[in-house]
Image (tube, grey):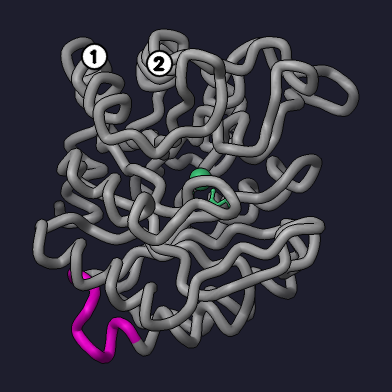
Amino acid sequence: MTSPLIITCALVGAELSREQQPHLPLTPSEIVKSGIEAVEAGASMLHLHVRDLEGKPSSEVKIFQEVIQYIRKKVGPIIQVSTGGAIGDSEQDRLGVLECEPEMASLSTGSINFGNDVFLNPLPFVEKLAQAMLKKNIKAEMEIFDISMLETGLKLVEKSLIKSPPHFQFVLGVPGALAATEKNLKFLVEGLSAEATWSVAAIGRHQFPMLELAIAWGGHARVGFEDNIYIEKGVLAKSNAELVAKVIQLADKYQRPVASIEQARSILRI
Ligand code: KMH
Ligand code: ZN
């Protein structure tokens, strides 16, 4: 049997608005509901950003704690908080979200152009985040938006700043960063050690074609509104759960069983 597929759902992100996606969960209770639905549909991990009551991106630990608590009460997925936050968030706020003691947190390993903005991740800050995660026993998911970010990720592993085995998320197709192509993904995957685990997230129309490659090649898959709001060309998805269900169809095509939450923990060794 082929190895179980970990499906992560990135529910909301920090950039999208209701104008773009009318079903976007915004308030803490909407994010909780959408997260529960995504897990019930088959996601074993949630990549979490939160918004305040007005729907604005927030790094308030209290909101994270509340959302996590409600999701955990109903379903018990791996919670991965975002330390990327929104463009321009302070380093202090980005470090602060680790206070809610999740099992995992995202760790972007370098700076990139992000559309017309710059997503800043200076090396000293990346290392500070990695140290803080180690200290709190939080597993990092290294977010790799460009080739040099893999180099840095591998150096962090060498310096023993990352819990073993290292886990990478290849986020492809962000305007200004690495394009979502088969050739680029192949290059990234070939750069990993045998023990590493990896997943793919891709932006917009690239989401499902790139996830299909990840599934076929033995990696894992991230879907969700943060990365893509369409279920098919020109048709907005009605929920995050609908996007998860579409990944499961792809998993079936390649005979990849969908990982249960416990299987996902065991694969990632958390
Ligand atoms: N919102 C982006 C600027 C992460 O969650 O770690 C960064 C981001 C990455 O979404
Ligand atoms: Zn994110």
Which residue is at 68% across, 64% downward? 118
Horizontal side of residue 82 vs 73, given as left or right: right
Q: Which residue is mark 1?
A: 70
Q: Quadrant of residue 21?
A: top right
Which residue is at 76% across, 26% downward? 230
Q: Does the magenta-highlighted stretch encompass residue 246?
A: no
The spot of residue 97 in percent (x, y) is: 29, 45
Instruction: Indicate whether 256 appears above or below 111.
Output: above
- Give the mark nearer the N terminus: 1 vs 2: 2
Q: Which residues are magenta?
A: 156-164
Q: Quadrant of residue 75?
A: top left
- Whether residue 257 appears in this view of the structure is no
Task: Name the kind of residue labelled 1 in the image.
Answer: Tyr
Whether residues under marks 1 and 2 lie with C-beta atoms below 8 angstroms apart, the answer is yes
The spot of residue 220 in percent (x, y) is: 45, 50
The spot of residue 216 in percent (x, y) is: 57, 54
Q: Which residue is mark 2?
A: 28
Circle 1: is it few (<14), some (14-19), or many (20+) Cα within 10 Å? Answer: some
Whether ligand 2 has any atom under 8 Å from the Cβ at mark 2 is answered as: no
Instruction: Give the main secondary structure, helix, strand or loop, of the magenta stretch.
Output: loop
Q: Does the magenta-highlighted stretch encompass residue 160?
A: yes
Horizontal side of residue 6 vs 147, given as left or right: left
The label on residue 239 is none
Instruction: Indicate whether 84 appears above or below 38.
Output: below
Secondary-structure class at tag 1: helix
Secondary-structure class at tag 2: helix
